[in-house]
Image (cartoon, grey):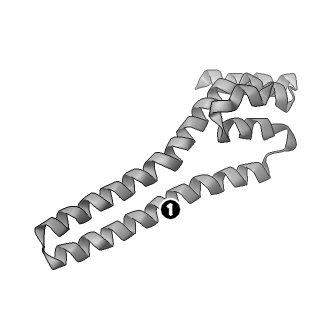
Amino acid sequence: MMNLINFLAQAQQAGNDGDTFCADLAPILKIVGYVVLGIKVVVPILLIIMGMLDLAKAVAEKDESKIKEAQNRLIKRAIAAVLVFLVATLVGIIMKLVGGEQYKGCMNCINRPYACNAQLE
């Protein structure tokens, strides 16, 4: 972590423009991009699958109160899945608005980590 902070401080002192800065940080931005992509895709899918499994168990038991309870949990998990996806998307949009023109390459690298090197060249 200290290496990243030292790198950022040196880059700021050297007066690097956004293109060099993003190219230097490309490996870190790729990792961040994959984490964001995982959060946007995997977490909502897991929440919905867990809710469906709860509902299937309740239906198999044929208890009306458990079915209603499982339906409520499924609805809450579906709403949570949508919120997780939207929060990650909203953070990306806010970063695009706040970041200057020189950091568009950095944001593109986070939004599409599989094509990061091609975007920085």
Q: Quadrant of the N terminus?
A: top right
- Give coordinates of residue 119: x percent, y percent: 76, 31
Residue at horizontal 74 percent and vertical 22 percent from the top: 24
Q: Name the amino acid, label 1.
A: Val
Residue at horizontal 78 percent and vertical 36 percent from the top: 105
Residue at horizontal 84 percent and vertical 44 percent from the top: 100
Does 113 sit left or right of 47 as displayed? right
Q: Quadrant of residue 67?
A: bottom left
Disc 1 on helix, strand or loop?
A: helix
Does 18 sit left or right of 94 as displayed? right
**7 or 24: nearer the viewer:** 24
Q: Quadrant of the C terminus?
A: top right
Q: Does residue 117 lie above or below 38 as drawn?
A: above
- Give coordinates of residue 59: x percent, y percent: 18, 69
Residue at horizontal 83 percent and vertical 32 percent from the top: 18
Q: Quadrant of residue 26?
A: top right
- Give coordinates of residue 91: x percent, y percent: 64, 53
Q: Quadrant of residue 64?
A: bottom left
Q: Residues within 10 Å of mark 1 (few under 14, many from 20)?
A: some
Q: Which residue is mark 1?
A: 82
Is residue 52 visible in the rendered image? The answer is yes
Is residue 22 visible in the rendered image? The answer is no
Does 119 sit left or right of 86 as displayed? right
- Give coordinates of residue 103: x percent, y percent: 80, 38
